[in-house]
Image (cartoon, helix red, strand yellow):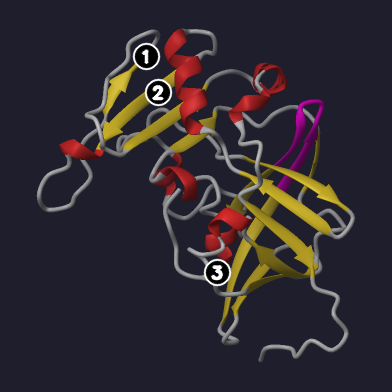
Amino acid sequence: MTLRNGVLFLVLMTAAIAGSGCSRTLVAALPVGTTTTCDAAWPGRWAAIPPEDRKGKHGEKAWLEINADCSVLTSIDEHGKRERENHKLTLISTRSGDFLWIADGDGKPPLRLETECLSGDKTHCGMELMRYVRNGDEIRLYSPDHRAVHAAIGAGSVPGYTEIADDSKAPASNEAAAPSALTGAQAAHPSQGSKTHYNNLIAGDPEQITTILEQHPEFFDSTPWMTLQRDTHPKRKKHR
């Protein structure tokens, strides 16, 4: 998943990577559960609130508007700049929790298909999930703990594929260094003080993915990366 312009993707599409550089965690199949493309509670206007320890980095206020059928997402910054994009929200309610997957307006993976694969030859591909918890007019979004997933796959306790990239190996041109592939119990030791990126694919069919997520709640952060609060202030000036 790559960083895109606009507050919307700061809030949603980059939630899974914001706290861990360019790490990604994919699942080979969507978990088993009740699936909908538009829960009636999601349309409307939401204020995007980062956690306290990150408000200094993302100080500007931001809002997200979701249209009636959840097919158009509009981001709004505090200066009134609006960015509209067509997407499909897939909400999956499972025995292991509630998850969100975002696809483009045709229901396919994001336009840059390679961003949903761990290699340029489109191998080790899947979907990138976020966990969410909705409580009334609040939705808390949780990003994957890529390091925890990497450790589990590397130890062989979870089936899949994982690779690691060490920033200290990046060339002077600032192009990303080619990751070293890891499977099973193999592991690389990044240089001290470097930034390590983990790319993971959790393997399995829908039932297996559901069981893995149920057995490993630590695969998602315990602190929300972002909280969406419904903007119901009656006197709030609407952005044009």
Residue 45 can be seen in this image: yes
Rounded to the nearest angstrom, the CA distance separating label 2 from label 1 is 6 Å
Residue 181 position within the rendered picture, expressed as x and y whole percent measured from the top left: 29, 22
* Residue that appears at 72% across and 21% down: 214
The dot on residue 162 is 2
In the picture, measured across the screen, residue 106 lies left or right of residue 126, that is right
Q: Is residue 163 above or below residue 156?
A: below
Q: Which residue is mark 3?
A: 7
Check disc 3 and give the amino acid type.
Val
Question: Is residue 93 within the magenta segment?
Answer: yes
Residue position marked by numbered label 1 in the rendering:
183
Q: Residue at x 43, y 57 (%)?
A: 3
Name the quadrant containing residue 11: bottom right
Q: Residue at x 66, y 36 (%)?
A: 222
Neighbor class of circle 1 (other Cα within 10 Å; few <14, some 14-19, many 20+) is some
Rendering coords of residue 198 (x, y %)? 39, 32
* Percent x, y of residue 189: 27, 21
Distance between the Cα atoms at labels 3 and 1?
36 Å
For the record, the magenta segment spans 90-99
Residue type at the position of mark 1: Thr
